[in-house]
Image (tube, grey):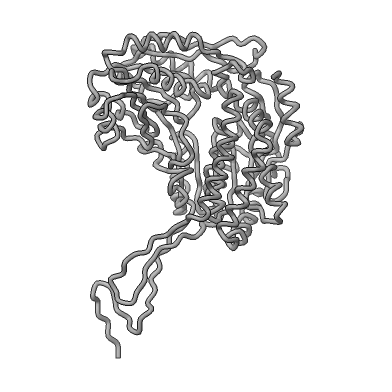
Amino acid sequence: MLFSEAKDVVSAAFALRETNPGVYGGSWSDGSDAQILECFSPINGAPLGRVTEAGAGDLAEVAGRSLSAAAAWAEVPAPKRGEIVAEIGRELAMWKNELGLLVSIEAGKTLSEGQGEVQEMIDLAGFAAGLSRQLYGLTIASERPHHRMYEQWHPLGAVAVITSFNFPCAVWSWNAFIAAVVGDAVIWKPSSRTPLTAIAVTRLVGRVMERHSLPPVFSLLVGGGGGVGNALLEDPRLSMVSFTGSVATGKKVAEVVSQRLGRTLLELGGNNGVIVSDKADLDMALKGVAFGALATAGQRCTSTRRLLLHENVYSGLLERLVRAYQHVRVGDPLLAETLVGPLIDEGAVETYLEAVRRAVDQGGRLVCGGTRASVPGCEGGHYVLPAIIEADPAMDIVREETFGPLLYVLRYRDLQEACALHNAVPQGLSSALFTRDLREEEYFLSHRGSDCGLANINTSTAGAEIGGAFGGEKDTGGGRESGSDAWKAYARRQTVSINHGADLPLAQGVRFEIA
């Protein structure tokens, strides 16, 4: 599809205009600080539109509406809340093609990845709907006679979700749909690089809520981190802030929110490693490594950034990987044959090229790629050739996350050494081992193996399913989103004790007699 055609399709589908309001709290309005955000496509640098940015005054109004909405929404039985979220999923499914296309032209994802991101939201809506009937608490044995103890979970109220450009809508749904079935209202601050996708999603969601005359459970504030972003962090009305982004910004989020004793859910950097054993299916490993390193042009928090190869397979697999890289189509993501699209902007290109230069200066050997790529018809875009660098684990840059298609390759002798090398970085998000040896698999999954929140056997570090709790350890932040019992992050736990006897026995045998 031509870029101009794609832009016309999404503009018509979501009523996107030259200038779009960036504030939604039950109705759309322009931002109060008079700042205009210019939006450009990473595909070719073409303008996509403008958005009026929210200010502190908009937050005050939207937060107030969200608190009122949360109070009303919490009165709706959880299974009914789940039905509404399921209907939102069906609404998204009706516009999957157009919304996926918008993700592609605004974030630079391939057509397949753009559609996949929308499908992730649809799947999450179904998961959340089922979860709405499973918000379980424990029954606890009491040591006191004629007493019953149990725990229950209540909504937090209003929460904020701050998302990154690389998943401009899916990560919001991980948070928003789960929080909604728990009974919370959600204020979304999307990345300033991808606000149009957020506006389109919010319009679709708003249609469903309006059909049922429901309050504005899902709100939107488009604005920079230094303005409305900081105000979100400081606002005591927001019980929890979920943030996806860099480690440096995540530390600031944690500091500011903790000052008011608020909660944070942090999904930060990933420096994900893949270990390939000499007992691995090498065809499977090749595919898994290539997908993990190249999908979304290496701009996933779960992208494969370090490849640890057993010395017996090192040369052969590295040679095959280089051949695969040389045949991968880098270019316009709107073309079906493209596997690697652009980086998000010129700043990302410069960061990538600087990382390659630093790696070589520190002693790494550039095997392939590592330069800008020229894409005919997309001269204003931000393209690079994916790089493979033979590295030494002592190189400082190997411990850093570079958001781009940059893969460091290291050699190891045995699995114990491989796991030590794998864990010797500050980040701890996703990990993988390719092997057909049961003992190696179990070692990697034991406390001696991967120290990451996600551990994979014979599959990629990228491409996590929604049913599992997503998140990492160490500098990655320690939060969990999406599946399993991650819903508890959006609720407050209450332990209940009920005395149904005729006396007042005390715990621990304490006696307290009064006349």
Please give the name of the residue rendered at 24% of the width and 24% of the height, measured from the top-left corner. Answer: 417
Quarter where residue 381 is shown: top right
Which one is nearer the viewer's eye here, 79 or 404? Answer: 79
Q: Quadrant of the C terminus?
A: bottom left
> Does 148 sit above or below residue 250?
below
Which one is nearer the viewer's eye here, 267 or 419? Answer: 419
Q: Quadrant of the N terminus?
A: top right
Which one is nearer the viewer's eye here, 204 or 384? Answer: 204
Count of residue discs: 0
Measured as percent of width and height from the top left, residue 439 is found at 24, 29
Measured as percent of width and height from the top left, residue 39 is found at 67, 29
Quarter where residue 500 is shown: bottom left
Measured as percent of width and height from the top left, residue 359 is found at 39, 15
> Does 423 sit above or below residue 26?
above
Which one is nearer the viewer's eye here, 374 or 173? Answer: 173
Quarter where residue 383 is shown: top right
